[in-house]
Image (cartoon, helix red, strand yellow):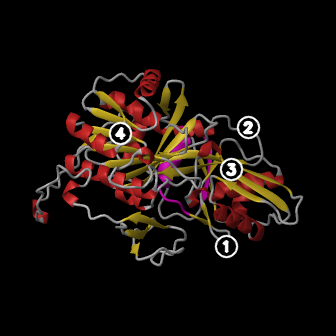
C-alpha cells in the first residue's frame, strides 16, 4: 500500500493538499515540499520520552522567578546572549563555512566544563579529529564527553545515559531521524531533528547549542520555521581573509537582539575584543580625503566606525553605485540629497561607499558621516582626523537629532577625538565631555561648510 504524502511550505509551515509553485498563504515561490505522512504516537516522538504525564497548570502556579543563567567563559558571547546562557534554552549558531562556529562552541567547553557536564556531538568529524582541535585550543575538561554520531535516536539514547547539562550538536544538517525517509540535511530532516532537540531542552532542562550551515544568500539552510523553533539565533559574520569576527543576535527570547560581540581569530582560537572601536579604527589613514568617523549604537554599546567614500568620473553612460556595510537604498538617498540640497553634483560620478572592519550600519545616525565622506572625496579635501560626525539626514537636507547622544559623545572623547559635529536640533541641554568641542549644524550645507570650507 502506497504511503500518503503531505505538502507544506517551508516558509510559513502551512499544509496543502497538492504541490504548487507558489504558497497560497505567504506568497513565497518554490517553498512547497513533499514528505511522507505517518501517524506518529506523540508520546514516542524523539525527545519526548521523558515528558509523559505532564499536566496543565494554572497561570498562577507558574514560577516566575528569574531564569537561571550561567557564564560561557567568553564575555562577548555572554553579552550577545543577554548576560549568559539560559538553562533549558535552544541556541542556533549560524555562519559561513570556516568562520569559527565550531571553534567558538568547543572553546567555551573549557570554562563550562568546570561545573557542568557537556556532551559534544559531532557529525562532521571523528573523535580523533575533535581531540586534535581541542588540543590546539587548550580544551581538556574532564567533564567534556564527545560523540561522533549522526543518528538522532542514538544521540538521544546517549543523552539519557550520561544526563548532560549541556548538549552541543555540530551540525544540525548532518543529523537524521531514522523515522523519516528523507535524506540527511533535507528540509524534513532538519525540521524533525530540531523539534526533537527542542523537546529535549524544554522537557529535561538541557541547554542545547546547535550549529547550522548557511546557504548562498547567507541565511541559515533549512526551513524558515527552524529559526522560529529555537530560543536564540546567532550569526557569526566576518571576512574569512580578515582575522576579526562579529557575533550578532538575530533572535533572542531572553535578551536584546541589538548587541554584538567582537572576536579575533588567533592561532589558539578566538580571542575577545573588548574595545571594538579601537579595532575598527586601527590603520585609519591620516589626512586623506573620503573618510569620516561616526559613532553608532550596537545595543547598549557605543562603537566608533569609519566610513569611506570614493567618487570618480564614470566611464559608462550610467554611473556605478556600490555600498558595503551601509544599506544600498540609504546610500542612494544620501547621494540624491547631496545632489539636490547640498549643491554637490554626482550625476556623472561613480560612487563607492564602505564601512571598515566588516561592520554593518543600519541606523540613521551615520548619515552625516557618510555625506561628509562623499563630499570630502568629491572635493578632494580631507576631513580633520580628530573630528566625528553624528546626525540623521532628512530629504530636505536638514539634520535630525540622534538618540543617546551623551553616551556617544563620552565614547568619542574617550578615544581622543577633539571635535564633533552634531545636529543643532536637540530636545535637551547638552554638556560636552572635557576636551571635546561641539560644532552644530542645521543642514547638510552648513555641515559641509564647517568641515570642508574652514
- Foreground mark, 2 or 4, reads 4
Work out whether mark 2 precedes mark 3 in sequence or the reverse, and give the earlier one.
Answer: 2
Q: Are marks 2 and 4 in contact (CB under 8 Å)?
A: no
- Residue 400 visible at all: yes
Pick the front one: 14 or 411: 14
Query: x, y percentage for residue 117?
Result: 26, 32
Q: Residue at x 17, y 55 (%)?
A: 64
In the displayed structure, 391 sits above or below 286; it is below
Find out whether residue 402 is within the magenta segment.
yes
Work out whether mark 4 precedes mark 3 in sequence or the reverse, and give the earlier one.
Answer: 4
The CA span between labels 2 and 4 is 46 Å
The part of the image, by quadrant, that contains residue 79 is top left
> What is the secondary structure assignment of the residue under circle 2?
loop
Q: Are marks 4 and 3 in contact (CB under 8 Å)?
A: no
Q: Which mark is residue 396?
A: 1
Q: Which mark is residue 168?
A: 4
> What is the secondary structure assignment of the residue under circle 3?
strand
- Residue 434 visible at all: no
- Foreground mark, 3 or 1, reads 3
- Foreground mark, 2 or 3, reads 3
Pick the front one: 288 or 414: 288
Q: Which mark is residue 24?
A: none
Pick the front one: 275 or 183: 183
Q: Residue at x 55, y 41 (%)?
A: 97
Residue that badge 2 annotates: 286
Amino acid at each position: 500500500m502506497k504511503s500518503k504524502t503531505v505538502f507544506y511550505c517551508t516558509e510559513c509551515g502551512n499544509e496543502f493538499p497538492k504541490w504548487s509553485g507558489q504558497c497560497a498563504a505567504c506568497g513565497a515561490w518554490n517553498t512547497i515540499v513533499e514528505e511522507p505522512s505517518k501517524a506518529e504516537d506523540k508520546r514516542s516522538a524523539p525527545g519526548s520520552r521523558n515528558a509523559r504525564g505532564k499536566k496543565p497548570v494554572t497561570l498562577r502556579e507558574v514560577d516566575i522567578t528569574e531564569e537561571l543563567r550561567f557564564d560561557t567563559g567568553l564575555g562577548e558571547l555572554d553579552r550577545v546572549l543577554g548576560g549568559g546562557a539560559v538553562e533549558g534554552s535552544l541556541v542556533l549558531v549560524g555562519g559561513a563555512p570556516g568562520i569559527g562556529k565550531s571553534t567558538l562552541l568547543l572553546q567555551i567547553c573549557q570554562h563550562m566544563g568546570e561545573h557542568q557536564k557537556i556532551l559534544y556531538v559531532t557529525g562532521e568529524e571523528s573523535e580523533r579529529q575533535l581531540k586534535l582541535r581541542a588540543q590546539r585550543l587548550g580544551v581538556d575538561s574532564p567533564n567534556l564527553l564527545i560523540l561522533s554520531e549522526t543518528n538522532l535516536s542514538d544521540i538521544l539514547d546517549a543523552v539519557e545515559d550520561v544526563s548532560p547539562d549541556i548538549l552541543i550538536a555540530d551540525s544540525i544538517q548532518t543529523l537524521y531521524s531514522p523515522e523519516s525517509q528523507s535524506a540527511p540535511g533535507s528540509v524534513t530532516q532538519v525540521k524533525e531533528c530540531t523539534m526533537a532537540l527542542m523537546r529535549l531542552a524544554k522537557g529535561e532542562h538541557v541547554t542545547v547549542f546547535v550549529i547550522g550551515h548557511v546557504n548562498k544568500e547567507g541565511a541559515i539552510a533549512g526551513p524558515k520555521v527552524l529559526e522560529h523553533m529555537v530560543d536564540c539565533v546567532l550569526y557569526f559574520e566576518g571576512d574569512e581573509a580578515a582575522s576579526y569576527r562579529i557575533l550578532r543576535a538575530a533572535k533572542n527570547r531572553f535578551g536584546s537582539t541589538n548587541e554584538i560581540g567582537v572576536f579575533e581569530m588567533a592561532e589558539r582560537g578566538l580571542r575577545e575584543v573588548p574595545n571594538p572601536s579601537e579595532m575598527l579604527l586601527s590603520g585609519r589613514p591620516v589626512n586623506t580625503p573620503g573618510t569620516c568617523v561616526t559613532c553608532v549604537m550596537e545595543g547598549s554599546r557605543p562603537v566608533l566606525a569609519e566610513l569611506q567614500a570614493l567618487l570618480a568620473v564614470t566611464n559608462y553612460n550610467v554611473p556605478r553605485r556600490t555600498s558595503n556595510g551601509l544599506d544600498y537604498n540609504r546610500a542612494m538617498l544620501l547621494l540624491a540629497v547631496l545632489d539636490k540640497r547640498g549643491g554637490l553634483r554626482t550625476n556623472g560620478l561613480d560612487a563607492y561607499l564602505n564601512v571598515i572592519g566588516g561592520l554593518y550600519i543600519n541606523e540613521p545616525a551615520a548619515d552625516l558621516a557618510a555625506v561628509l565622506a562623499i563630499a570630502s572625496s568629491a572635493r578632494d579635501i580631507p576631513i580633520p582626523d580628530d573630528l566625528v560626525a553624528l546626525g540623521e539626514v532628512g530629504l530636505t537636507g536638514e539634520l535630525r537629532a540622534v538618540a543617546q547622544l551623551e553616551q556617544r559623545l563620552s565614547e568619542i572623547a574617550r578615544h581622543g577625538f577633539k571635535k564633533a559635529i552634531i545636529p543643532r536640533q536637540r530636545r535637551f541641554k547638552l554638556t560636552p565631555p572635557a576636551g571635546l568641542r561641539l560644532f552644530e549644524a542645521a543642514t547638510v550645507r552648513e555641515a559641509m561648510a564647517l568641515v570642508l570650507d574652514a
